[in-house]
Amino acid sequence: MIEVWGILNVTPDSFSDGGLFTDAGAAIAHARRMRAQGADVIDIGGESTRPGATPITPAEEQERILPVIEELVREGMRVSVDTVHAATARAAVAAGAEIVNDVTGGRHDPDMLATVAATDAKIVLMHSRGIDVLADTEYDDVAADVRRHLAARREAALAAGIPLERMIFDPGFGFSKGADDNWRLLAGLGQITGLGAPVLVGTSRKRFLGDLLPEGADASEREAATAATSLLAAQHGAAAVRVHDVTSTVAALRALERTNRAIDESVGPAHWVTRLDETGGSITPAPAVRVDGIRARGFHGVLPEERRDGQEFVIDVELRGKFANAAYTDDLGHTVNYAAVAESVVRVVEGDPVDLIETLARRIGDACLEFPLVENASVTVHKPSAPIPVPFTDVTVTLDVSRGGTA
Ligand code: PMM
């Protein structure tokens, strides 16, 4: 089962539970309760991200959370610290926290990434924009924009000395996202899981869930919607969910686990049942989709005349992924639309010039992975008209890309 992180806000003003656990004794008691309910990690925050919350100094933040962390670690709990301050992260890790959860992805405090790099702790790199989580909600394509942002945070963290194995990505539900953006992000979670590290999802009690409830319902009535969205996140590849009410989400995830177990134990043709945490079916081998001989004109190459005059490129792509159900459902939604793939390939060839066809092949491969259900792509780029002084028929480069190994 995926991990469940129980939220422990030791703050007077968090949006749904502010003020409940400001006293260390009450906070520790609540953490124990969450552990008994099935929480794998306790995520402790001492500063609220709620719009309008009073900012506090790192010293005040530490005063609130360090005694709690020390006690939870002493009792064998795994602790994550929700902070944007490097000094607090350092002190919390010294007190035994094993994860630093930074809602700014290390952008707020210039020392954060180097501080985490110097420890053994993991870091949650979350997508967010400004301080005001209700502002700045314009996106071209929210899942692709968030993926790009997190890929850049990944590069920054790598440059600071944090290996990929110590990273966790979080698309930041509710942070500068309009209501529909949150649903699009959930639908497009595969783009985030493709970044190469586990993904954490936090929908708990967030405003966008209010749209599912009768008008006037308050945040405490969002538990069923939290459990449902956490379950959907698990089905879309999340490795962990961050929730206030542990019992309801653990029950939902156990239902998924039980059903999948029944599927694994089932007899009969594999396509009668589909594991619920896979969008594709369980028939093997899954069909491959090939599109060969896609022609487009581009200006790639090292030679000046290639850049000036351009030439024809011919591309073959073979895509593999979770297409198995298509053979039984006859539904285009269960496979990849090869016409759209071909158009996307042409756009890349006609796009910004590069020197090497290896680079071009890689860009085409990345474009193929943008399609849902595609898990790997083999791309061959032919350059039959390359201006070399020897008679020849073709020059090609073939490159394979797969989710998790690219971007
Ligand atoms: N949401 C809140 C605070 N911290 N951290 C991560 N990694 N992901 C989130 O979605 C997230 C977070 C919002 O406030 P809350 O603590 O009251 O849920």
Image (cartoon, grey):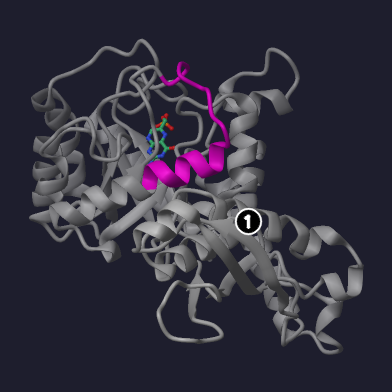
Secondary structure state at the residue bearing disc 1: helix
Tally of marks: 1
Q: Where is residue 359 in the image (x, y as percent from the top left)?
A: 40, 65
Task: Quadrant for residue 253, please give it.
Answer: bottom right
Q: Position of residue 210 (x, y in %)?
A: 65, 24
Q: Name the residue under label 1.
A: 346
The kind of residue on which mark 1 rests is: Val
Q: Up-down: is 216 above or below 265? A: above
> Image point 8% across, 50% down: which residue?
94
Point out the image quarter for the C terminus: bottom left
> Image point 63% across, 59% down: which residue?
296
> Image point 46% across, 47% down: which residue?
147
- Report the image quarter containing ligand 1: top left
Q: In this view, does 311 lie to the left or right of 258?
A: left
Compare residues 117 and 293 and report the one nearer the observer: 293
Q: Up-down: is 364 above or below 146? A: below
Q: Position of residue 178 (x, y in %)?
A: 58, 24
Q: Give the range drawn in magenta.
A: 133-150
Task: Quadrant for residue 39, please give it.
Answer: bottom left
- Does residue 405 show up? no
Q: Is residue 135 magenta?
A: yes
Task: Quadrant for residue 314, please give it.
Answer: bottom right
Q: Up-down: is 103 above or below 314? A: above
Q: Is residue 106 left or right of residue 211?
A: left
Q: Is residue 44 magenta?
A: no
Disc 1 crowd, CA 10 A, few/some/many (<14, 14-19, 20+): many
- Does residue 327 show up? yes
